Image (spheres, rainbow, N blue to C red):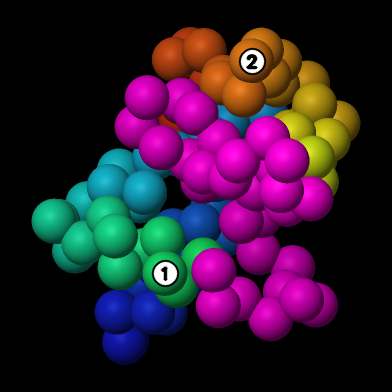
Amino acid sequence: MTPEQRIFTVLADVPAGKVVAYGQLARMAGLPGRARWVGRLMGHLPQDSTLPWHRVMKSSGHLAFNEQDPRFQKQQRLLENEGIHVISGKVAQHYFWQPA
């Protein structure tokens, strides 16, 4: 399995109503230290991808985009549709996924 496939497999498992950080996603896929690479990979997903890219954010809980960026609005809307509260561009730590 390629590194990309490993990331996509873990990302597909992130349940609705939960989020992961870029670095957390990399570690869970067995690729520690590759948070920035994960960010670039998310940025190159095709428009028609069904992967839940919106569930990936900074470890601080902040969305990755500037508030004026249309992608910020889309990510916030998708998260809120899943019951995740976004306040001032940030989600609370209790939304971070901790798989068993």
Choose the circle earlier in sequence order: 2 or 1: 1
> What residue lies at 38% left-to-right and 79% top-to-bottom?
4
- Report whether 100 appears left or right of 81: left
Quarter of the view holding residue 55: top right
Residue at 13 percent across and 56 percent down: it is 33
Q: Which residue is mark 1?
A: 40
Counting from the top left corner in percent of width and height, residue 17 is at 67, 29
Q: In the orientation shown, which residue stands out farthest toward the bottom? A: 2
Q: Tell me the SS state at disc 2.
A: loop
Query: Which amino acid type corresponds to the residue marked 1 in the rendered image?
Result: Arg
Q: Residue 53, relative to residue 80: is it above or below?
A: below
**Left or right position of 95 against 73:** left
Q: Residues within 10 Å of mark 2 (few under 14, many from 20)?
A: few
Image quarter of residue 31:
bottom left
* Depicted 48 relative to depicted 74: above or below: below
The magenta segment: 43-72
Q: Secondary structure at mark 1?
A: helix
Q: Residue at 36% x, 63% y: name it.
A: 38
Please determine whether, in this image, residue 61 is positioned above or below residue 15.
Answer: above
Looking at the rendered structure, which numbered label has been put on residue 20?
none
Instruction: Tell me the chief SS of the magenta region.
Output: loop
Residue 62 falls inside the magenta stretch: yes
